[in-house]
Amino acid sequence: MDELLDKLGEHGWASADIFSIHLAAEEAIVNAIVHGNKLDKGKKVHVACFVSSTVARIEITDEGDGFDPTDVPDCTQDDRLEVPNGRGVMLIHNFMTRVEYNEKGNHVLMEKVQDA
C-alpha cells in the first residue's frame, strides 16, 4: 500500500484522489482476504498496480471461490442501513472510475482516471 501511495504522490495525484484510491484498494484487499480466501493463511492474494499521471489501475485476485457482485445487496436501502456487509463494494464503485470483475468473481480490476 505504501508503494502505491508513494507512486500516486510522485505522479502528482490530488490528495482527494489518493484518498479514494487508497480506500478502494484497501477495501478490495480486505474483501479478498476475508470473503474470498476466508482468512485461510494457505491462500494468497495477488495485487498488481500501474500508476501514471493520468491513470491508476489496481488488479486484485484471491484464491477463493469468487462471488457474483450483482448479488451484493444495496447497503443504502432502509432495511440494510445497520448491516455492515456490502459497504466496501459500494465504496469501491463510488470512488473508482471503472470496476470490473472476472466471470468467477475472484478478480477485480479497479481504475481511477485523474480529472483533467
Image: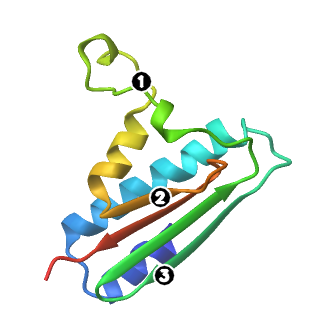
Residue to which mark 3 is pinned: 50
Label total for image:
3
Query: How far across and how far down the image is residue 46, in percent?
Result: 68, 64
Above or below: residue 55 compared with residue 109 = below
- Residue at image coords 65%, 58%: 61
For the residue marked with disc 2, what is the amino acid? Glu
Element at label 2: strand
Q: Residue at the right extreme?
A: 42
Q: Is residue 1 above or below residue 9?
A: above
Disc 3 from disc 1: Cα separation: 30 Å
Which residue lies at the image location 20% right of the left edge and 64% below the top edge? Answer: 16
The residue positioned 25% from the left and 79% from the top of the image is: 13
Question: Is 16 or 49 nearer to us in this picture?
Answer: 49
Answer with left or right where residue 41 lies relative to residue 29: right
Label 2 crowd bin: few (<14), some (14–19), many (20+), radius 10 Å: some
Instruction: Return the mark for residue 100.
Output: 2
| Disc 2 from disc 1: Cα separation | 23 Å
Spot occupied by residue 6 in the image (x, y as percentages of width and height): 41, 79
Q: CA distance from mark 3 to mark 2?
A: 16 Å
Three-letter amino acid code at the position of disc 3: Phe
Q: Which mark is residue 84?
A: 1
Instruction: Answer with mark 3 or mark 1, whichever residue precedes in sequence.
Output: 3
Q: Residues within 10 Å of mark 1 (few under 14, many from 20)?
A: few
